[in-house]
Image (cartoon, rainbow, N blue to C red):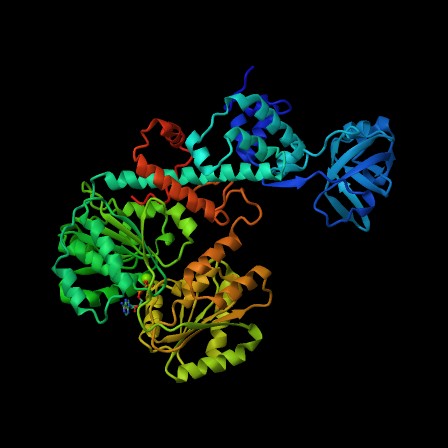
Amino acid sequence: MQSTLTSDIQYLPGVGPRRAQLLRSELGLGTFGDLIHFYPFRYIDRSTIQPIASVLPDMAYVQILGTVMRADLIAKGGVQVTPDKSQRATRLSVWVSDQSGSIELVFFRGIKYTYEKLRPGQTFLFFGKPTAFGNRLNIVHPEIDTPPAAGADTSGLTMTGVYTSTEKLKNAGVTGKVMLRMVSAALNSCMDSIQETLPEYILKEKGLVPLKYALRNIHFPSDAQALSKARYRLKFEELFYLQLSLVRQKYVRSRSENGIVMPHVGEAFHKCYNALPYELTGAQKRVIKEIRADMASGHQMNRLLQGDVGSGKTMVAVLCSLIAIGNGWQSCIMAPTEVLAQQHYKNICRYLEPTGCKCALLTGSTPAKERNSILAGLQDGSIGICIGTHALIEDSVIFHRLGLAVIDEQHRFGVEQRSRLWAKSPGQTLPHVLVMTATPIPRTLAMTLYGDLDVSVIDEMPPGRKPVETLQIAANRRPELYRFMKKQIEAGRQVFVVYPLIFESEKVDYQNLEQGWQDIVDHFPFPPYKVAIVHGKQTSEEKTFNMDAFSSGRANILVSTTVVEVGVDVPNASVMVIENAERFGLSTLHQLRGRVGRGAEKSFCILVKGQKVSAESSKRLDLMCSTENGFELAEEDMKMRGPGDLEGTQQSGLPIELKIASLAHDGTILTLAREYAVSILERDPSLSRSENAILVLVLQGGKYDIKNFSKIS
Ligand code: ADP
Ligand code: MG
């Protein structure tokens, strides 16, 4: 029977229904094709044979050529049993030796079979991981091969692929060797039905090897060079199609005529603009122009606004909202936390004063009466701008004419939450969408996650911001730290002290916070000091009260969890103390640091280290001290947390599963692939030329549809 890529994996020799079921549930492998595209995550050099005497317990794998000296069947309690009682044996111990020495091999499964196979006097190739058992060295369940015939060419056997496996699969006997046999059988029986997935001209222009060659060599590399060509081809293909799919979506959207047309800038905009207490930065002006052009274009805007903490994104959101107002539409701004929504509301109301535009705040804690009047105002259009939290996406919220939806710190919202926002003016054209983020995203990631969005970047800070001096100290230097804080407070400054609260429900974290707070209160007694505290378990009144105490300057110190991470603006705060800094990720640390350095004074970020700091955490803290550039930190962060040497394994947390390419490590290929995808679409926007037929076919296969992530409308 001729097999094809869609043949069921159970028909492979040695698989059968039970193993097939396991392969499906454990690894998601159901067909020959799945198996062929299931690539090794690393390779082992099997070209060298280790003398037994040189085997050490810390070696990852060894291959030895050993002659069986004796084989013992051993039952419970270490009692040796005779072959006729082999079913009672729980362990098989085999001693093999070569000219240099001897070593024990141990088997707990397949005992009878292995005992019969490994007859004394015979020589085999054994391959496995040595382990130290007490002061003895052995190899448990080595793979067994017949030795190469004398004079045979073994030069081709340099690298053996290693596949991801699971305990269950191993128990069912699906060893590495079995995997290799399966893949080999699948490849051999389908080789003829494997269709090239890239047009001939792309292979030529980009110097890529054909698919068949790539697939054979990714599993069974004939040598290192062939392997690297195979990998390059497969990585390029993967990233290329991903980008082609994204860029094409963007092209399609930019051609469709379904956006609300907002041709005017409007009076409200000018009134606000003219009353601003400062000049906009060049970057802010540029970004506003980009957004304005989108809103006037007649296409729906889908724009991501990236700007480091403190770069002034709020102002951009306000002015763009006023453009919507000036064209007779409403706008909403959704923030991830109550604290932030309130702060936005307070600031924005001030900016709106000269415009006469009516603004409302809607959160979970808005009292029912007020809430009802806001809902009415949104529905009849009398409220122009509504600021809020998740409360904005509740079903009862309906806008008269929602023209612009702004989402601050968009990564804090789920896709569904976000998309519910655009359905707020039933029966009307979708509003323009602006998502904002202060979390710098590495370029490669942005190109993928937001590949179909337009991106604006505020790459300039408002004038007068001073660098923040960042230092790390050990916890035992806290007395010194407290003296420093007192000096700053005497000079009229304010201090943030942040505790990690990674899992809000974890009791121990709260103890941390409470102990920390107690310690601070003990050292900074009232009077003259005043300490406020904010954390996730407070009611929103408590939070507001404490936040107000700090932002109005009444409290000198704000002790908190990471609720201050997002957006809080207190220019007079000049010190950010981060306790157990090793427990935070780089991007959080960077966000926290962004809370200071906003005023005219020199600011400090002090990273207090706990007892145990891993090497990786140390590196993070060092990085924090070495740069203030959020994009640089983001790149490093991705590299550190990325898939490391397990390249090709799927990257957790991403909406796409890359089979072989890595966003952290293949940035260069990604950039090339994207540029190439763009150039192809420029030449042939609808991919209707015959040489591009393959591209359309592959895209239609759906493998490269990015799962509902960047689809923001
Ligand atoms: P983020 O981008 O982090 O949201 P904000 O919008 O909160 O930043 O702005 C940070 C601070 O900078 C605010 O106090 C804001 O009033 C101020 N700001 C914004 N734009 C300018 C500017 N062009 N010149 C001076 N200060 C500005
Ligand atoms: Mg902000």
Total numbered badges shown on the rendered structure:
0
Looking at the picture, tell me which residue is in the foreground, 595 or 540.
595
Asked if 286 appears above or below 673 in the picture, the reply is below
Q: Quadrant of residue 29?
A: top right
Q: Quarter for ligand 2?
A: bottom left
For the N terminus, the quadrant is top right
Residue 188 location (% of width, % of height): 59, 23
**533, above or below 669, in the image:** below
Do we see residue 524 in this rendering? Answer: no
Establish if 347 lies above or below 635: below
Q: In the image, is 361 to the left or to the right of 234?
A: left
Does the image show residue 658? Answer: yes
Picture residue at 41% right of the left edge, 30% below the top: 698
**Where the C terminus falls, by quadrant?**
top left
Q: Position of residue 314 (x, y in %)?
A: 28, 62
Q: Nearer the viewer, residue 666 or 123?
A: 666
Horizontal placement of 330 versus 463: left or right?
left
Q: Is residue 359 left or right of residue 645?
A: left
How far across and how far down the image is residue 339, in percent?
A: 33, 63
Q: Nearer the viewer, residue 558 or 418?
A: 418
The one nearer the camera, 32 or 73, is 32
Kindly give the residue lying farthest to the top in the view shown: 1
Residue at 50%, 59% in the rendered image: 506
The image shows residue 201 at horizontal and vertical percentages of 42, 32
